[in-house]
């Protein structure tokens, strides 16, 4: 089974983790809990009338936990490197390796620079799937946008990265689309309650 490391625990990082773990990839998140969402109140996120940003983050964390994401809360990643077969990250507690890397560190682009990702001006250069110039490494959210820093845009970036990873693994274009019957199977009738 392929593995994914996500660095960052905001809307982009947790969305990427949710999608990859839900679809069978071993997923680990390193989260310093520095997301801007803790300073936000969401009125403009589709499907949500009004929610405190910290409550939103906790909901995303719970969703990730439901699908088996391994989260390292309060653990900072200090270095990332491509190692030929994937990626190695160095963090406060040691090292971890994965086949894919998703960088979701807000406007802090230091890890992308250390990895050797191409830049377009001040932002990480990515394609529509959020893949960087380093194969298998993705950058999301504020890392790739000069000014458009919105939770819903970041979540979409995380989803795009995850779907591309899943497409790579499955060898065909992958869609994450569930039906009411899927929800029944996954949650035993609790969906939508």
Image (spheres, rainbow, N blue to C red):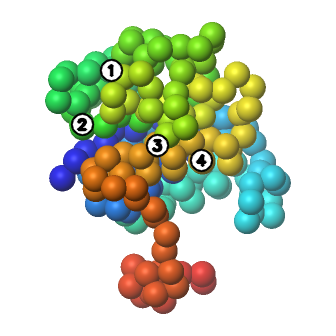
Across the whole image, how many numbered discs are drawn on residues? 4
Q: Residue at x 80, y 60 (%)?
A: 50
Mark 1, residue position: 80
Mark 3, residue position: 161
Above or below, 176 against 36 in this view is below
Secondary structure at badge 3 equals: helix
For the residues carrying marks 3 and 1, which lies nearer the camera in this image? 3
Mark 2, residue position: 98
Secondary structure at badge 1 equals: strand
Of marks 1 and 2, which one's residue comes earlier in the chain? 1
Q: CA distance from mark 2 to mark 4?
A: 22 Å
Mark 4, residue position: 155
Of marks 2 and 4, which one's residue comes earlier in the chain? 2
| Disc 4 to disc 3: CB gap under 8 Å | no
Q: Quadrant of residue 142?
A: top right
Of marks 4 and 3, which one's residue comes earlier in the chain? 4
User: Is residue 25 visible in the rendered structure shown here?
Assistant: no
Q: Residue at x 58, y 25 (%)?
A: 143
Spot occupied by residue 66 in the image (x, y as percentages of width and height): 40, 65
């Amino acid at each position: 089974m392929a593995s994914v490391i996500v660095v960052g625990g905001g809307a982009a990082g947790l969305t990427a983790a949710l999608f990859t773990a839900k679809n069978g990839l071993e997923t680990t998140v390193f989260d310093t809990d520095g997301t801007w969402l803790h300073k936000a109140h969401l009125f403009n996120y589709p499907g949500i009338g009004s929610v405190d940003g910290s409550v939103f983050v906790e909901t995303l964390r719970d969703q990730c936990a439901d699908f088996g994401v391994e989260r390292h809360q309060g653990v900072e990643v200090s270095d990332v490197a491509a190692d030929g077969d994937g990626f190695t990250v160095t963090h406060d507690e040691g090292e971890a390796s994965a086949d894919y890397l998703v960088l979701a560190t807000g406007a802090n682009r230091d890890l992308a620079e250390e990895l050797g990702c191409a830049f377009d001006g001040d932002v990480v250069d990515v394609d529509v799937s959020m893949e960087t110039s380093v194969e298998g490494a993705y950058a999301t959210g504020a890392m790739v946008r000069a000014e458009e820093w919105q939770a819903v845009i970041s979540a979409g970036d995380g989803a795009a990265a995850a779907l591309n990873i899943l497409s790579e693994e499955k060898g065909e274009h992958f869609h994450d689309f569930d039906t009411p019957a899927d929800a029944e199977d996954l949650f035993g009738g609790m969906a939508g309650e």
